[in-house]
Image (tube, coloured by chain):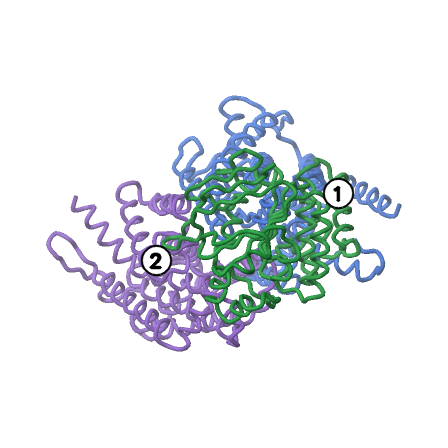
Amino acid sequence: MALYVQAIVNGFLVGGVYSLMALGLSLIFGVMRVINFAHGDMMVWGMYLSYWLFVTAGVDPYLSILVTGSAIFLLGAAVQKGLVNRILDAPHEMQILLMLGVALVLENLALMVWGPDPRRVSTTYALSTFWLGPIVFDLPKVATFGLALALALGLYLFLKKTDLGRMIRAASDNQIGALLVGTDILKVFTLAFGIGAACVGAAGSLMTPFLPFSPSTGLFFTITSFNIVIIGGMGSFLGAFVGGLLVGVSESLGAVILVPSLKEIVSFILLVLILLFRPQGLLGGSR
Amino acid sequence: MILLRVTGVSKAFGGLRAVRRVSFDLAEGEMLGLIGPNGAGKTTLFHLVSGFLRPDEGIVTYAGESLVGLRPHDVCQRGMVRTFQIARPFLRLTVLENVVVGALERVAHRREAVAIAEEMLELTGLADRAGSMGHSLTLPDRKRLELARALATRPRVLLLDEVMAGLNPTETGRLIDLIRAIHGRGITILLIEHVMKAVMALSQRILVLNYGEVIAQGSPEEVVRDPKVIEAYLGEDSAGAEAGADFGIISGGQCCG
Amino acid sequence: MLRLGLGTAAAVALLVLPFWVPSAWQNLLITTFYYAYLGQAWNILGGYAGQLSLGHAAFFAIGAYTSAILATQYAISPWLGMFAGAALAAILSLGIGYLGFRFGLRGFYFILLTLAVAEICRLIALHLPLLGGYTGLFINYTPNPWQFQFQGKIPYYFIALGFLAAGSGIVWLIQRSKLGAYLVAIREDEDASEALGVDTFRYKMIAYALSASLTALGGTFYAYYQYYLQPNTVLHINHSVDIMIRPIVGGAGTILGPVLGSFLLELLGEFSRTYFAGGMAGLSVVIYGVLLIIVVLFLPRGVYPTLAHLMRRRRPGRAA
């Protein structure tokens, strides 16, 4: 029993950063209707940046989220401004192809720069734990969870309270409407992709203290992000959040109940069930 | 003979009761107008009749057979076809190909379908645009294409959803002539219309819907004089109020229903 | 007349080509035809019916594993086993289609459903001893045509060419039929099609089953060309991507699209491998990715539609 509770706790903690990652994807899809196939690769670049800052300058990954968030913001904005904005009226499948191309480039650039071997950010506190009753808490996971939560809350407040945020939400609700009232929609798009990318970049940094990574890690996170936003409800902020926690817990439980190499299957089956019986997602509104 | 019979049909979306216990008959060869202020439930009623929505209660029968539970293509196959309020041409197909899709409902082979399609393009005055792509059409031509496509399925009943919306008076006049010609071929027509000139000119009988309920029906002259109808339109915003006052042409572009 | 002449010349060229070119080129041509064939199969569902699938690796793998296992365990010739694989793939596609289309999944949702099913298949395959798990499944080489095994590359060249010709022929027939007109109408506007009497559910199911079973036949070819099947290759999402990108680059929903797309991408891939593979790991793929992005930016409607458009402009008065 304790084993399962432990798995749930760990999954929940990792789920927090999954949520942040999925929020980024949800934002990008919600505003532009673009599926960011490079989402996980952007995340991996955030991880490598944190790693690089850690090994060269000793910057703690929890501090370097500022740098990685900004850098991946620029990367995302550049992808939108330089590439996606140019083919907005092309058939839908072309956008998919474009983002697959971006994913290939990012993943293999990482391979060129860092090589195929997994990297690890070995902080002094990497193995610190504390006990609450019979449950062990990994200190880095708790810190990551707290920071991911704080960033998600920050994003929420930005979207709700600021003019820029309201503009992004308006574009997300009704592209044509936002176009008509004279918002420079291309600028909003660029900003939205940048912010979505910044979320996933920061999420990457936040995971480095407890997760080794390599260039091929990106694909797993891209697919996990897809799962989460569908499970939670496309375009629903709360949905992406709850979905992240749910997927974190289900993977963690899957690893205990089945074999670790089958842990993803639980979230895939969850995804299929959601798609079939509640396609708008757990917390999504009407389709 | 009654072709379409709607009996006590209701539909609610969440708390909003869009259509409430509506009943009416459509006789073969008739041209029935369906009017009402914005949001009166006209388009919802169309969705219910054509199989896009399933009524919460009530019965829809076509030539004596219940349509409840049938999907739109089943309804079309039985001989009743609808058009859409906002014309929906297949954008990346030619005008001819658009109509061929409709014609294939009745014939299995492309060659015959093309022949039917060409005939319908001739009838609707689109013959010279047969090779143009759907996306290149002007609004009036899109409306004609909706008609041509629907006619190609060889319907007995045609359900027209605001075909006049967005057209100028000249174009409206031409389309009225076209619809008369279609009616003249023996096709029964039920039309939702916001453009009063068109409804008055075309309908033999008019059904007025407000807040999802039938509030009046009768000949155009009777309906215009009905105090409940005038009140319903006066309750609407300025554009509607104007309509209630003189039943003139309401400018197009209103696309909510 | 000109077209007939050109067609004959092309046919003759294709027939003598393998005897003239070096072995590496033979391999390149085989891969090109074979992916063009898979692209053609994908095209039926993704290009014509407009239901983008990112899970065709599942059907491919079903075809590959079914014929391989029937041959190795039950001594059934792959020439027969491939149809068993096609039937199984059709059944799976109908299952996915029934659930997905019934509930009206469209666009991104359908893409994700197909991807999820393929990933589930991959994870299951990795844990199935019958399929060799992580180690993969090896097929013993016994050069026997009845076992779909041949010496040298030339027989494979002609089989791949035959697959492509047959696949293209099927798509050509579809394009000219009621089915084709309906699929394209569904792609353009599902509700409008339904209103015009198109049973959209039924026709999407037909397209899916056809597409899946043709893809599975291609899987058998792969199994007996490579003699080795591993879930992380044949069932990987990257393989689904490989199947999908060629028809899109070439022009989804056109008969020449998958062929042109396959040629172009094979050339780009070969170019990046030849000139950049010696460098750092990953460089050639980066170049390939960049080229892919450039193709999308400059030919956002696909190769064939762009070419056709240019041709029409150069020959005014002959509207296609």
Q: Circle 1: is it few (<14), some (14-19), or many (20+) Cα within 10 Å?
A: many
* Residue name at image x 44 percent, y 70 percent: A170
User: What secondary structure is found at the residue carrying circle 1?
Assistant: helix
Chain identifier of the residue bearing label 1 in the image: B
Q: Which residue is mark 2?
A: A239
The label number, if any, that marks residue B211 in the structure image: none
Position of residue C113 relative to residue C217, above or below, is: below
The x, y position of residue C154, in whole percent, is: 70, 37
Which quadrant of the rendered structure holds the N terminus of chain A? top left
Most distant residue in the right direction: C1
Q: Is residue B138 left or right of residue A82?
A: right
Find numbered disc 2 in the image and state the secondary structure of the residue it sits on.
helix
Q: CA distance from mark 2 to mark 1?
A: 50 Å
Q: Which residue is mark 1?
A: B116
In the picture, one chain is green; tell me its letter: B
Task: For the C terminus of chain A, give its image quadrant.
Answer: bottom left
Which of the pair C126/C1 is nearer the observer? Answer: C1
Color used for chain C? blue
Write down the chain letter for disc 2: A
- Against B6, residue B217 (above or below) is below
Residue nearest the observer in this picture, C66 or B94: B94
Percent position of residue A188, x then y: 48, 73
Q: Residue type at mark 2?
A: Gly
Mark 1 residue type = Ile
Same subunit, tags 2 and 1: no
Q: Which chain is purple?
A: A
